[in-house]
Image: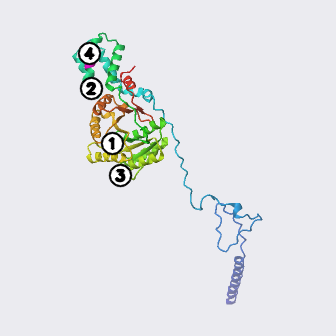
Amino acid sequence: METVILAVVIAVVVLGALGGLIVGSRRRKPLPPAPPKTPDITAPPAEPHVGEEAETPSDEERRSIEEVGLPGASAPVGVEEPPTVEAPPIEIPEPSAGRLVRLRARLSRSQNALGKGLLTLLSREHLDEETWEEVEDTLLTADVGVLPTEELVERLRERVRVLGTRTPVELRGLLREELLALVGTDMDRTVKTEPEARKPGIVMVVGVNGTGKTTTTGKLARVLVADGRTVVLGAADTFRAAAADQLQTWGERVGAYTVRGPEAGDPASVAFDAVKEGKEMGVDVVLIDTAGRLHTKTGLMDELGKVKRVVEKHAPLDEVLLVLDATTGQNGLVQARVFAEVVDITGIVLTKLDGTAKGGIVVAVQRELGVPVKLIGLGEGADDLAPFEPEAFVDALIGD
């Protein structure tokens, strides 16, 4: 019995050993080769490493550096050429002759209230005291001034009494004659820029801040260029940073040279240099733009006198133009008085006359200073500065 059991155990052991050999041989069997991977077309090419061989050179014939040429050979390598800045084209300004006639529509839009108001009052059947008081009020509202108003009303009353009948045509002619007499037709309104026996003519432009003085100086340069003159601009308003830039821009548009100084520098020095440059260049006119003086600042007004004295070391001033804002009305007369005490005003420029119904300031300021209005500004356009013509002005006041 034990012999049988032992034989069974041995048989089991032998069978287990044989099975292990078979399994082990199967495990050691080599695996089949893996299928080739599809290349990833999105992966970037590998970077070359130090020591790797370069690609096989092609058979292309070698060229010298002269034949190949360097990119951007006109400029040093690594240095960018500055962009080319083209000079602005020189403009040809509109002729100054007849400008006021062309701009009459702008003037009449703002001034018609005065002329039409007077014509309406004078056309009443009965011209009693109340009507004449209304005529006076209309003139005073237009800033004609007290004394000129009294004179005009007195003359109108006398002529209407003598005339008797008053047709619209007769009234219009009567009013035109009296307003022309009030504005003045016998004043010399020429801007003096051509002194005898010397060049250049010297014009100084003065005025309070905000009147449009620098812009007026630039526009005056255009008027002179339109009349065939050559111009140098002196930017003597050194206290306002943008003033010199603004004036230079105006000059460049018409080919006028601008003399500048350092910001907050001596205005008298800039004015002196401008006249000196003008002489050396042989130009016809030097225009000097001064700082906008507040008439309450005594020190600044004294400095304006200094500018005038320094300029006159070269030659006498031919014109001192005072720029006034027509919209300020009677306040402009206060400014005018103070400026007249410091420098000898020779002419007046009234700006913004298209934006006010107070055209009577022309009469008032002439009476106050005893000098003529020579130029008027009728808009913001470059050629909206016009020589003052009494006839065209009065015609715009009373309409057609």
- C-alpha span from label 4 to label 1: 43 Å
Label whose residue precedes the other's in the sequence (4 or 1): 4
Q: Which amino acid does label 4 sit on?
A: Glu
Looking at the rendered structure, which numbered label has been put on residue 158? Answer: 4
Task: Give coordinates of residue 58: x percent, y percent.
Answer: 75, 65
At horizontal 35% and vertical 17% (from top left) the residue drawn is 173
Dot 3 falls on a residue whose secondary structure is loop
Q: Distance between the residues labelled 1 and 2?
A: 28 Å
The answer to which quarter of the image holds residue 145 is top left
> Which is more toward the observer, 323 or 47?
323
Q: Which disc number belongs to residue 209?
A: 1
**Disc number at residue 148?**
2
The first of marks 2 and 4 along the sequence is 2
Residue of label 3 = 266
**Amino acid type, label 2:** Pro
Numbered disc total: 4
Q: Which callout, 1 or 2, points at the residue further toward the start of the chain?
A: 2
Q: Outermost residue, right direction?
A: 59
Residue pictured at 64% horizontal, 59% vertical: 71
> Magenta residues?
154-159
Residue 155 place in picture, x, y as percent: 27, 19
18 magenta-colored: no
